[in-house]
């Protein structure tokens, strides 16, 4: 065992002890964060506009600081982007994480000298937690690849801006730099398909031990390796034994990954975003990720089914329940206040507090009142494809409200399969059964003949990659929505399918 491997185990034990300390007092940890946030930001423009000096309790905070999304907070953010100081947080941010907004164009999420270290610390602690639990630290001596956005940055009014994953690339610890791939030159390639080929050129000669990235990106990387070598990824990289991922639910990809790798590997799930690093998987055999309650983020939780009510409840960590779908609301050391990130989560445990990401509050299907969410379609696909031993590359779901004359509306599942000769009728029946088990509204609409059972439309190989390329979102931090309440995605996929059939 190398000195680096031994040191990693010692450090992991120290971090585990610190983690247990704050996790054993969740309410106290959050109360401390809450008070520190208000105190530190007390002289900012936002604090003065919302009378922070008179906030003594969480109820005061609710009364004086409304929940906002990016558009609502934009008047303050625009002042920060223009170069003003002390607007949302003392001074100026270190960076802006630039993201693509659906309604507001480019979004500029501030990252400050207080918030940036929390991103780095959480990613580090996720790996150390795995080492402490499993005793496996051998991988620290191997090569590690982090598939991410370009680390090149622009400057806007004296503040650097770029993709979060590119910003984080500048903070890889020195002791990992020699092990880290791809090279800075390759990482700076903008075109995703060109970048993947360059990454493969660099990694094929190496002994890769850790591979990390959003599953859809990594899947493309794996597929190209198999195509180029004619071997399974696990044979090409015999030391590869840890996959680290975040951004989307891995379960719909798991069967495909097992097929591409050729064997099982351990994995660590992360829950990062430009707005903060919220949680990581701390146990291999426990469902959910440990919610980070001492990382400069104060959380509020609004029950998703009450989110659009006039005055929905804003719960703190001590008030949540297991299994309820909540909209995640944040106040952070980056100067986001009662900010609606758009993600929905559910708790799987309260001792300690672990969460799963259930979807996006704007990503749902309720065209007929069915209230279907991302977690439900992903769980249905996982169960149905598992029962029938079918490999799924990718899928999304849309309502079909204008079927052939006289026919009832239905949910249309666009699915790209990892194999041929699929019995679509069997899969449709299984998926429909799983959806009816999970969602009583959907079941009632099928029973009442308001909806007919779902239908599958097969998408040609690489069809979803072509879709993402068509909208200029191939690679990067871009993710395919699992479902939508309209047919914007469906219409583009229909064109791709039509061209393939010509």
Image (cartoon, rainbow, N blue to C red):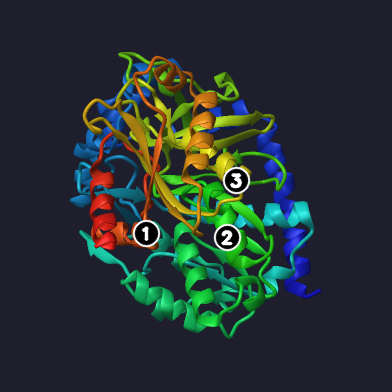
Q: Earlier in the sequence, mark 1 or mark 3?
A: 3
**Crowd band around label 1 with a 10 angstrom C-alpha radius: few (<14), some (14–19), many (20+):** some
- Placement of 9 over or under 312, stated as above or below: below
User: Is residue 410 something that shows in the picture?
Assistant: yes
Q: Residue at x 41, y 29 (%)?
A: 453
Badge 2 crowding class, 10 Å Cα cut-off, few under 14, some 14 to 19, many 20 or more, is many
Q: Are marks 3 and 2 in contact (CB under 8 Å)?
A: no
| Residue 48 in the image, given as x and y percentages of width and height | 27, 29
Looking at the rendered structure, the secondary structure element under dot 3 is loop
Circle 1 or circle 2, nearest the eye: 1
Q: Quadrant of residue 141?
A: bottom right
Nearer-the-camera pick, 123 or 77:
123
Residue 436 on image: x %, y %: 50, 25
In the picture as drawn, the residue positioned furthest to the bottom comes out as: 205
Label 3 packing within 10 angstroms: few (<14), some (14-19), many (20+):
few
Look at mark 3 in the image and give the residue it sits on: 388
Residue 47: x and y, percent?
Answer: 31, 31
Q: Along the horizontal axis of the image, is 409 left or right of 461?
A: left
User: Which label sits in the foreground, 3 or 2?
Assistant: 3
Q: Earlier in the sequence, mark 1 or mark 2?
A: 2
Q: How many marks?
A: 3
Q: Residue at x 43, y 22 (%)?
A: 442
Q: Tell me the quarter of the image containing the C terminus.
A: bottom left
- Cα distance between the residues tagged 1 and 3: 20 Å
Residue highlighted by disc 2: 257
Residue nearest the observer in this picture, 437 or 293 = 437
| Residue at numbered disc 1 | 460
What residue do we see at 39% from left, 18% from top? 445
Q: Earlier in the sequence, mark 3 or mark 2?
A: 2
């Amino acid at each position: 065992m190398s000195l680096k491997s031994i040191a990693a185990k010692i450090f992991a034990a120290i971090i585990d002890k610190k983690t247990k300390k704050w996790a054993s007092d969740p309410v106290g940890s959050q109360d401390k964060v809450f008070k520190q946030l208000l105190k530190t930001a007390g002289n900012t423009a936002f604090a003065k506009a919302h009378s922070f000096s008179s906030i003594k309790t969480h109820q005061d905070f609710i009364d004086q600081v409304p929940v906002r999304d990016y558009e609502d907070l934009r008047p303050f953010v625009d002042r920060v982007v223009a170069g003003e100081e002390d607007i949302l947080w003392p001074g100026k941010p270190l960076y802006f994480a630039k993201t693509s907004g659906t309604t507001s164009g480019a979004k500029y999420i501030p990252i400050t000298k207080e918030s940036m270290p929390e991103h780095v610390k959480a990613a580090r602690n996720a790996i150390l937690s795995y080492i402490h639990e499993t005793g496996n630290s051998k991988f620290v001596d191997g090569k590690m690849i982090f598939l991410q956005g370009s680390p090149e940055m622009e400057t806007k009014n004296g503040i650097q801006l770029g993709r979060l994953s590119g910003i984080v690339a500048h903070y890889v610890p020195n002791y990992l730099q020699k092990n880290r791939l791809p090279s800075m030159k390759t990482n700076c390639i903008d075109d995703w398909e060109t970048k993947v080929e360059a990454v493969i050129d660099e990694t094929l000669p190496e002994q890769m031990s850790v591979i990390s990235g959003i599953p859809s990106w990594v899947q493309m990387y794996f597929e190209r390796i198999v195509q180029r070598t004619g071997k399974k990824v696990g044979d090409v990289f015999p030391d590869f034994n840890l996959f680290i991922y975040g951004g989307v639910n891995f379960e719909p990809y798991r069967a495909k990954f097992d097929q591409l790798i050729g064997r099982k590997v351990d994995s660590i799930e992360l829950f990062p975003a430009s707005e903060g690093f919220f949680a990581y998987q701390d146990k291999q055999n426990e469902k959910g990720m440990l919610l980070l309650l001492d990382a400069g983020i104060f959380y509020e939780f609004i029950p998703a089914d009450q989110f659009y009510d006039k005055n929905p409840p804003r719960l703190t960590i001590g008030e949540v329940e297991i299994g309820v779908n909540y909209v995640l609301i944040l106040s952070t050391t980056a100067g986001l206040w009662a900010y609606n990130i758009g993600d929905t989560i559910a708790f799987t445990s309260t001792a300690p507090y672990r969460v799963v990401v259930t979807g996006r509050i704007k990503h749902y299907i309720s065209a007929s009142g069915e209230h279907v969410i991302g977690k439900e379609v992903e769980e249905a696909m996982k169960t149905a494809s598992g029962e029938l031993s079918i490999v799924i590359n990718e899928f999304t779901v849309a309502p079909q409200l204008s079927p052939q004359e006289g026919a009832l509306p239905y949910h249309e599942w666009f699915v790209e399969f990892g194999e041929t000769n699929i019995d679509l009728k069997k899969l449709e029946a299984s998926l429909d059964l799983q959806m009816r088990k999970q969602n009583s509204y959907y079941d009632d609409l099928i029973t009442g003949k308001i909806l007919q059972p779902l239908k599958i439309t097969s998408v040609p190989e690489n069809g979803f990659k072509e879709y993402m390329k068509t909208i200029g979102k191939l690679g990067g931090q871009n993710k395919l929505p699992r479902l939508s309440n309209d047919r914007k995605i469906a219409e583009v996929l229909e064109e791709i399918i039509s061209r393939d059939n010509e």
